[in-house]
Image (cartoon, grey):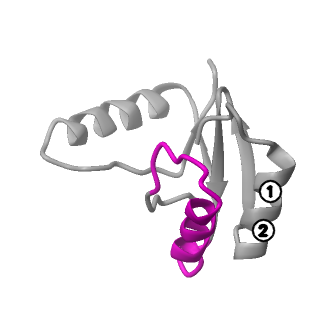
Amino acid sequence: MEKENVKEDDLMEVILDAGADDLKAEGDYFEVTSSIENFEKVRKAIEDKSYKMESASLQYIAKDLLTVEGKNAEEVIRFIKAIEEYDVQNVYTNADFTDE
């Protein structure tokens, strides 16, 4: 949801009371993270407080990232791009690419 007209402390209280795991400030937006079991409860709590959500969706978030560098990173990126060319909705990875 956009940060505009939303106080971070107020939003944090609402989502934590509903069972959310985390709130992150990402640029002009807040990103709320919760378990799949609490997703609907958290979404409803946000909606009940009349906060305007940009989107609400389930996403895979890797627990353990795997560092991928150099030639291996290039191959993984090429593979991900190849998969994205097919009719898929989302592609997830636990690869942690270095900035090299």
Residue at mark 2 to residue at mark 1: CA–CA distance: 6 Å
The answer to whether residue 64 shows anywhere in this view is: no
Identify the secondary structure beneath mark 2: helix
89 or 86: which is nearer to us?
A: 89
For the residue pair 57 and 62, the one nearer the viewer reads as: 57
> Mark 1: few, some, or many residues within 10 Å (few <14, many ≥20)?
some
Question: In the image, what residue type sits under mark 2?
Answer: Leu
Residue bearing the label numbered 2? 16
Residue indicated by mark 1 = 12
Residue 62: % across, % down? 57, 59
**Residue at position x 53%, y 52% in the image:** 94
The percent position of residue 46, horizontal first and vertical second, equals 62, 61
Residue 4, image x, y percentages = 67, 31
Q: Quadrant of residue 45?
A: bottom right
Residue at horizontal 65 percent and vertical 27 percent from the top = 28
Residue 97 appears left or right of 74? right
Bounds of the magenta segment: 35-56
